[in-house]
Image (cartoon, rainbow, N blue to C red):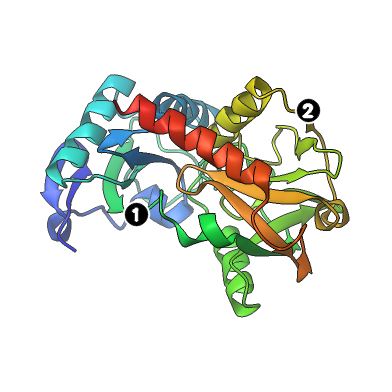
Amino acid sequence: MNRIVYVNGEYLPEADAKISVFDRGFLFADGVYEVSSVLNGKLIDNEGHLTRLHRSMNELSLTPPATNEEIETAQKTLIEKNNLDQGLIYLQVSRGVADRGFHFPENTPTSLVMFSQKLNILESPYAKKGMTIITVPDIRWGRRDIKTVQLLAPSMAKMAAKAAGADDAWMIEDGYITEGSSNNAYIITKEGTLVTRHLGTEILAGITRKAIMRLAAEDNMKIEERLFTPEEAMDAAEAFLSSATTFVTPVVSIDGKTIGNGTPGPIAIKLREFYIEEALASTK
Ligand code: PMP
């Protein structure tokens, strides 16, 4: 790989890009991140991602390393320098470099790192065949509404899914599905109602989720933002998940129990099409 990456105002070949071993992102997972998808060389839903980035920084008293305009300019420059047509821009803000200690250091500049990654989002094989999901206990901390870089629990969830021969994991707390390891979780009941967990500190407020909910409402779908159990999900007509890099991806089984007839459901397919149509239109 020979990308140009962004580190604190500089564009560097990835082999030359360095962060200190004392960076608190490295030592304490003291940092937040965002992932914006790219279609036709254009950022999708980026305003939402930058707004959430600011909220995450604010919740952790992280000083923004740059203005939104500066960040977006750097994101676009990376797309250009790396000739990125389809994929993602990852960006991370960490509290910066300080002697190791639990208290947040004062007067330490936050650090900003960004890189691009190619990914075929539109032609993902999972869009066609759907994903198989297992459920795992949600062992994450209590502020999942903040998009921090502490991603060991979701990594373990995805490894458990892999070991079980499944594609991904949804997490369960107090008997209810919170969200996916790196996505929001939805079901369509047999009555055709779209159900997804309400927002709160237990889940991340997905930027894609917001768009999907709007598109579903515009299509006059009945929507309920509420708790739902794995049993209700297994008994649903359809299930699907959403994130910036998967858009809407159908779910065809949960813990080995087939959802519907085991193929992507019509509403998941329709919502994916709506989302892609709007995203592509925004690149024109
Ligand atoms: N929940 C979690 C835990 C995630 O990691 C993600 C992906 N960042 C999402 C939900 C979906 O959020 P978005 O649509 O903004 O990518």
Image position, residue 172 (x, y; %) = 77, 55
| Residue type marked 2 | Lys
Residue 127 percent across, percent down from the top left = 52, 54
In the image, what residue occupies the spot 63% across and 44% down? 268
- Residue sitting at 37 percent across and 32 percent down? 280
Residue 222: give its label. 2
In this rendering, position of residue 231 left or right of residue 29:
right
Of the numbered discs 1 and 2, the one sitting upstream in the chain is: 1
Q: Nearer the viewer, residue 135 or 187?
A: 187
The quadrant in which residue 90 appears is: top left
| Label 2 environment density (alpha carbons within 10 Å; few <14, some 14–19, many ≥20) | few
Mark 2: secondary structure:
loop
Q: Which residue is mark 1?
A: 119
- The image quadrant where one finds ligand 1 is top right
Which class describes the residues within 10 Å of circle 1: few (<14), some (14-19), or many (20+)? Answer: some
Dot label at residue 262: none
For the question of whether residue 61 can be seen, the reply is: yes
Q: Residue at x 22, y 27 (%)?
A: 73
